[in-house]
């Protein structure tokens, strides 16, 4: 069985690449807030505070590309997840193209670029939209104003778990009343018996 339903390393790496390309900031100036020291100068700090289940998960199957006896199929449990994405930009300039608000607005405008879409598509991220950019200036050490802007985005990803399974190759059906036995198709190796419903029929099934 697959262990992790979502590869967060791939998701977060793609989001960092997206923000670096869209904001114009260098790598190292785009960070995740958890456990990271604060960089100097202008930077963007991000986090994903909420992950919600969208609708009901579903199950489907496919052929195992490396089948063995009893493991011919792969069963998938899949579902959509809606993620809230918070971005905060801290900037030294109080005005101009490198103000915190301007950096986030530049990032949002890049969403329509094909190269940005390709970065997200490669990680199977569906970025829905961004909210309003809010400017929130704060005071540091009681005297220095620190320009800061925040925006929230929403993206969707797929959760997927898998395990191997098998299928019934041969069924031997015996009528309990008449004793008539029908085999479809001819029997194979391993045999499993079970009762079908409440109509008095025993199914003896051969699986590989």
Image (cartoon, rainbow, N blue to C red):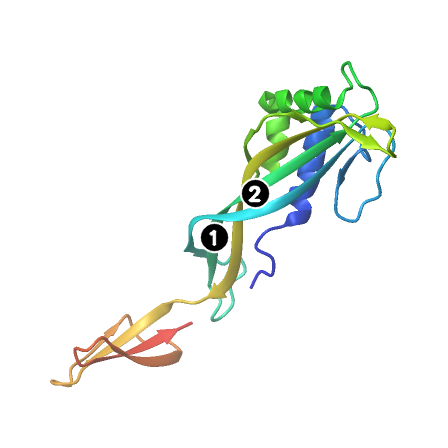
In what quadrant of the picture does the C terminus appear? bottom left
67 on left or right of 40: left
Q: Residue furthest front?
A: 142
In the rendered image, the vertical position of residue 95 relative to residue 31, given as above or below: above
Which residue is nearer to you in this view: 78 or 150? 150
Q: Secondary structure at mark 2?
A: strand
First in residue order: circle 2 vs circle 1? 1
Q: Position of residue 149 (x, y in %)?
A: 71, 27
Q: Residues within 10 Å of mark 1 (few under 14, many from 20)?
A: some
Q: Residue at x 63, y 27 (%)?
A: 116
Q: Is residue 143 visible?
A: yes
Q: Is residue 123 visible?
A: no
Indicate the position of residue 28 as horizontal and vertical percent values.
82, 35
Q: What is the x, y in percent for residue 76?
A: 47, 57
**Quarter of image, res 184:** bottom left
Q: CA distance from mark 2 to mark 1?
A: 16 Å
| Residue corresponding to mark 1 | 78
Residue of label 2: 83
Name the residue nearer the viewer: 11 or 52. Answer: 52
């Amino acid at each position: 069985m697959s262990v992790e339903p979502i590869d967060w390393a791939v998701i977060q790496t793609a989001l960092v690449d997206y923000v670096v390309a869209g904001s114009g900031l260098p790598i190292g100036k785009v960070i995740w807030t958890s456990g990271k020291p604060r960089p100097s100068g202008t930077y963007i700090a991000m986090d994903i505070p909420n992950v919600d289940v969208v609708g009901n998960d579903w199950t489907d199957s496919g052929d195992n590309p490396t089948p063995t006896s009893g493991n011919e199929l792969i069963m998938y449990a899949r579902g959509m997840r809606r993620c809230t994405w918070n971005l905060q930009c801290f900037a030294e300039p109080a005005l101009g193209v490198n103000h915190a608000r301007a950096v986030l607005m530049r990032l949002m405008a890049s969403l329509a670029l094909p190269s940005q879409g390709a970065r997200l598509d490669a990680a199977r991220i569906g970025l829905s939209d961004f909210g309003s950019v809010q400017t929130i200036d704060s005071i540091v050490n009681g005297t220095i104003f620190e320009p800061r802007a925040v925006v929230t985005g929403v993206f969707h990803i797929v959760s997927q778990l898998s395990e191997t399974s098998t299928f019934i190759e041969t069924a031997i059906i015996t009528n309990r009343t008449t004793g008539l036995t029908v085999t479809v198709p001819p029997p194979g190796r391993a045999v499993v018996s079970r009762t079908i419903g409440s109509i008095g029929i025993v199914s003896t099934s051969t699986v590989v």
